[in-house]
Amino acid sequence: MKFSKIYINTYFETQLRVALLSEKRPSIFVRKSSGLVREVYPKDSFIYNVYFTAYFTALVFVYLIALYVVPAEALVPGLLLSAVLFAFQVAVYALMGAAMPRSGGDYVIISRTLHPLLGFISSWNWFIWLAFWFAFGGYTFSSVALSTMFLTLGLISRNPALVSIGEALANPIPSLIVGTIIMIIFLLMTMFGLRRFIKIQLATFVVGVLGVLIGIIYLAITDPSTYAAKINALLAPYSGVPDTYNAVINAAKELGWSTERVYGYTLEHLVKVMPAAYAAVPWTMGTIFIAGEISEVKKSQLFGGLGGLAFIGGLTVLLAFLLEKATGLEFLSAFAYLFYNPPENLTIPIQPYFNTLAFLLIENPILNLWANLGFLFLGWMYMAQNLLNDSRLLFAWAFDRLVPEKLAEVDERFSSPIYALLSVFLIGEVFLFLIIFVPELQMISSIMALSFSVMIMSLAGMLFPYTRKDLFERSNINWKVGGVPVITIIGALALIVNLVANYYWIVDPNYGAINDISVTAMVTVIVVGIIIYLVGVYRMKKKGIEPSMVYSQLPPT
């Protein structure tokens, strides 16, 4: 009897102790459901991924870099090869997003496949550079997009006042004001939930594509002699010479340019186009960050990713072909050369950007304005995607309790992480100020930094069937060829493509990917990320949460 009393007392004391500990120790995740709603469908994923490429913002540099690195004749076939090679990278993201459909992108996938530190570093890397590009978009919206629009409208209408406005918009203070305004607009656009944003996205995409079609038609019906006559008539008052077209070619020759930069190419030249194309083409995987909000997840990821790549890759090839056909190979190559080697004896009020060269052909002001709007939408709507995607990274970190849980709060009415979005906006505003008033930061190249994250994801794809065999076997991507998982093969090929790109970025300074400030920034981002991760893990353990328990399972939907 005495033994029974002792046993019963001990039992209840133990249960009470467990209950008290359970009350003090928080649950592994912030809550039992994410609070996010699946309201993005395949067509929405397609447009979302097309916009995520920052297409026209980056395309102007794709052509300029490629024309400076390889002969002009290699541009079109090189871009076609690049689009094919980039399919492996996009497929890795699409398939892994289908296998682990949770918002948070690289972080959730890599932390559950390879190691939590790698998952955080990869996603932190994305977070910083997406915030940087959000700010860069604010800066270039004024200094490139609006500036170019007013310049072209002023030139075709022979209106010096519009040209002056275009020139003024490229200055620091107007760039700061316009950049801040457009960033606030995108913040408001994304705060009210994905459902509303998707409707805006569709409307702007339709207007944008129609605008691009206008430019395509004008390029298609133009030949070099017609283009030369048009350029000469428009630019003579500013260049001071009657034949600006040939003056560009002659000025380039005086600075070392020759027709060797135009004709003839090797297989290596085609491959060397790929590191330049990397700036705009292979990024149709933005939906990986909002995977927890996607319906028909496998279809949406594959159609949105690979379908988006087919659209972007095909459009890039088509526009390059038409631009070369309309302007002439020698003029285009020479003008690109002058972009990197400015002449002292020739003044031209335009840069050899795709939109400028193409839209000068459109003399009808209404059509010209529409074409410029298409350029704006397909070039700068990515700012919304960057805001959304960065907010989902903050949300995923907070949901795992790695950063303050406040960032995982979701507004019940709009199903939107308001605090996370506001945090990204504020970080972007700081970057905007720095980009404008510390001009050296404009030299930062984030391409290699983002490739670093892509390579980690490619490695995760390769090893997923082996490190998380349970998840792989239950997933919707458990295909095999000759006993080898398809995702392993695709991950390996994506890794090889990125290693080739990195090789050329490192050995050839003409790509502009390597400079002191870029290397310093890349290393600093990684070091800071490691520190934040270690502090986050310490906080988790202090709260009584074992990190291994968090990362052994997927967060709830």
Image (cartoon, helix red, strand yellow):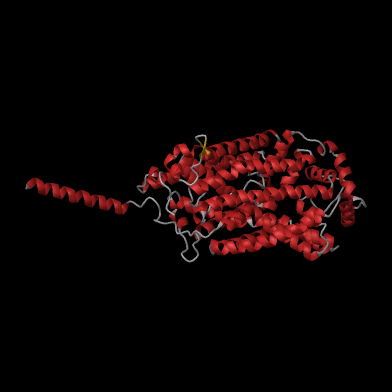
Instruction: Count every numbered label the image shows and give the total.
Output: 0
Q: Residue furthest right?
A: 242
Residue 449 seen from this side: no
Looking at the image, is 223 positioned above or below residue 85? Answer: below
Going 62% across and 43% down the picture, which residue do you hit? 87
Residue 542 seen from this side: yes
Where residue 522 sits, quadrant-wise, is top right
Q: Residue 264's x, y, as percent?
A: 81, 36
Q: Residue 102's x, y, as percent?
A: 48, 51
Q: Residue 444's x, y, as percent?
A: 65, 44
* 447 displayed left or right of 416: right
* 187 displayed left or right of 157: left
Q: Residue furthest left?
A: 1
Q: Residue furthest front?
A: 482
Foreground pick, 226 / 238: 226
The quarter of the image holding the C terminus is bottom left
Going 68% across and 47% down the picture, which residue do you hit? 313
Q: Residue 319's x, y, as percent?
A: 75, 50
Foreground pick, 499 / 146: 499
Going 53% across and 46% down the picture, which residue do you hit? 95
Looking at the image, is 493 positioned above or below residue 143? Answer: above
Looking at the image, is 382 positioned above or below residue 70? Answer: below
